Image (tube, rainbow, N blue to C red):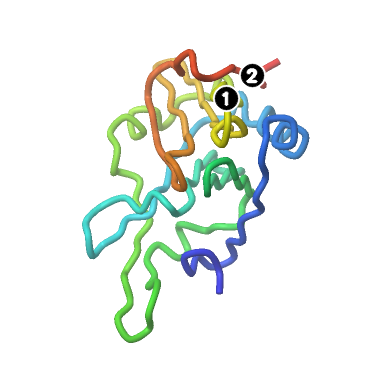
Amino acid sequence: MAFFDIEGYEPVWLSGFETIRRAHGDRLRALVGKRLQCVHLTWFVEYGEWLQDAPVVVDFGDERLEITHWKFDELSLTWNTIDPYGTSEWDWGDPAGPSPLRWRQDIHPELSALEGQVLQDVELLESLHKGVAGMMVALGFVFPNGRFTVFNAMDENGLEYTEPGADYRKHSLAG
């Protein structure tokens, strides 16, 4: 069974800044200069809320980056495996009492405001916390009129729209 029954999606878990940079740095850097189409989030229809455990799909048209945080420090970045247009709605969970899920792009107005803007930078944001959180890596996306960060919200994805605080070391991939 696929992760949250999302057809074609199989996360690949990585931990630590260097490991993630080596695996995905070049491809993330190649996103700079591309226009953001939208950000797809999974909507839990039954509860009327964003399902933060499911992937955040950042759609640049010819490239879709799928971001999922898990546990305390694991991050999966996959590319072009989810088709939010072909399968916009699906059931997840117990077949006897399935929970309908749906891709949505209109959950957060801060994300909608960035649609159509050209990506200026991708940042790997390395957590400076000691202990379990010390291996966490967030992704920052910088645009002319705003930004967003997908971070580990303790075993699920979180979103922020402000400059990262002093608890992160920023690594720009723009060059």
Outermost bottom residue: 96
* Callout 2 amino acid: His
Residue 175 tag number: none
Q: Work out which quarter of the rendered image holds the C terminus and state it.
A: top right
Give the mark nearest the N terminus, 1 or 2.
1
Q: Is residue 50 above or below residue 9?
A: above
Image position, residue 129 (x, y; %): 54, 24
Q: Is residue 40 left or right of residue 16?
A: left
Residue sitting nearer the eye, 143 or 99: 99
Cβ atoms under marks 1 and 2 closer than 8 Å:
yes
Rendered view: 133 above or below 129:
below
Horizontal side of residue 45 vs 54, given as left or right: left
Residue 75 position within the rendered picture, expressed as x and y whole percent measured from the top left = 59, 44
Label number found at residue 125 = 1
Name which residue lies at 47% across and 20% down.
143
Give residue 171's mark: 2
The N terminus: image quadrant:
bottom right
Q: Nearer the viewer, residue 26 or 20?
A: 20
Write the residue at 57% across / 26% down.
130
Q: In x, y percent, where is residue 127?
A: 56, 25
Q: Amino acid at mark 1?
A: Leu
